[in-house]
Image (cartoon, rainbow, N blue to C red):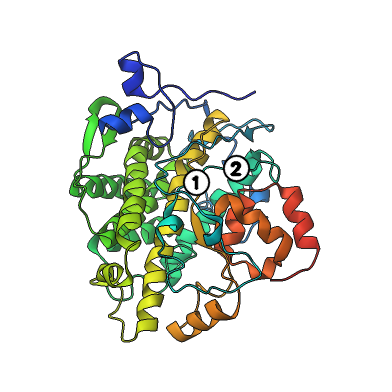
Amino acid sequence: MRTELNACRACAGSKRKCGRQMPSCARCAARGRSCVYPLRTRPASSSRPLISRAMRGSVPRVEDGLLTEVTGSTSSSTGDLILPDDIRWDIEFPFMNGDFPTPLSLIYTPSAPVVRADWFLAPETWAISQKFDTSADAPIGRVEMKKHVIVLQSWFERWATTGSNPFIHPRLYSANVPACVQVAYATLASYIHRTPANTDTVLQIVEDRSNDLLLENGAILDRVGVEEWADRGEQDVDLFTQLTRLHALMVYQIIGLFDGDIRARHVAEGHIAIQNSWAAKLFHSAAKALSNTQTAAATHLVGCLPRPSTDSQQQWYLWILSESIRRTWLIAASLSPIYVALQQCFAPCPGGVMYTNRSGLWNAASATEWERQCSARSVGFLQRFECDRLLDDAEPADIDEFGTAILDMTFSGELLEKWRDRSGGF
């Protein structure tokens, strides 16, 4: 039995019917106002951690990382969630601002390489799609969601230790690391290496820096008493700035929502509406800016990636920027639904977008290598909810780490286990 999501505060206050869409209901979106849903929390407990020790060892992770308990202390004595064993994530799939239909001609089949130069820039590739076929999956349980949280935490730690991860490309910040990203990076490193003696100080820094980030980008405290923020920032912000501020906020959110400290969780809950708003703005700005000609799209590389010296390098850099935006949207859009579902047993799914699944493309060392891989075999550029075709025509080794994580959160464990037990190939 699922728990229904409450009406948003604006609709409840005006006694109007709320459509309960995420991240913003249709009524709030039409009026350009902040849409905030009340979060119903369960009683806290100090005896049951969010991620058990047994579960921590069941997924790939960086040793001694974000999830490692501080010896002799936890961030909070009362901050962990109590979750019944039979929680299943009951998913709904509303359209979220789907401006473009998704033509099957642009969902590249696993059997053919890319033949169009603009395969990742076409307007149709920027659709936010709802799910059409539910036959291939089952409801996602709390174990799968917790494992996914562990994976995301390990990815943030990897960025702090190596400079990249499956949604922050190694080249993305090679020429320009904006101040907000530098601050978030340093804060994340401090959090990873916190001690029992300085944990409270580190979490206070996370809170202060996240609030500063919101203020610097035009957000305001919408409801001071409950510390809920609303996005009042400028609409015309360049793509790179939008992407970098979202990366910075995601650092603070992954800490605040899942650390276990009650105060940190409260602050992060108040920032959820901003995170969702920034993610939506980023994706729609990318759809408008990058779906034109390559010449127009290339202007968005200025001040971002290094200056391209060849046409193929420009193409590669455009893919890096667009793919980073797609992957960042998928991660940002999943954080609050996972958090809400772990609390309330239900959360609307924000939908899916197209992204590249083929192993090797994300870590290609040069434009030449990237272009060669695109020409030699399928890139697996698919809508999230169309990726079941990979289970028929691809081997697990053909799918990169990001694609594998999305598959694990989209399809049933039994279906994926059967896929991994048999062999195949593109």
Q: Given the image, on which type of amino acid does mark 2 rest? A: Phe
Is residue 321 visible to us here? Answer: yes
At x 37%, y 74%, the residue is 317
Q: Mark 1–mark 2 contact, CB under 8 Å?
A: yes
Quadrant in which the C terminus is drawn? bottom right
Q: Quadrant of residue 172?
A: bottom left
Residue assigned mark 1: 129
Residue assigned mark 2: 132
Q: Position of residue 93 (x, y in %)?
A: 53, 37
Task: Identify which residue, 262 or 392, lies in the foreground.
Answer: 392
Q: Counting other residues with Cα less than 10 Å from the Cα at mark 1, is it few (<14), some (14-19), or many (20 or more)?
A: many
Q: Position of residue 32 (x, y in %)?
A: 26, 34
Asked if 57 appears above or below 314 in the picture, the reply is: above
Is residue 259 visible to us here? Answer: no
For residue 416, side relative to residue 261 (left or right): right
Task: Identify which residue, 167 or 110, lies in the foreground.
Answer: 110
Q: Given the image, on which type of amino acid does mark 1 rest? A: Ser
Q: Position of residue 61 (x, y in %)?
A: 58, 61
Q: Position of residue 244 (x, y in %)?
A: 31, 59
Q: Quadrant of residue 207?
A: top left
For residue 381, side relative to residue 277 (left or right): right
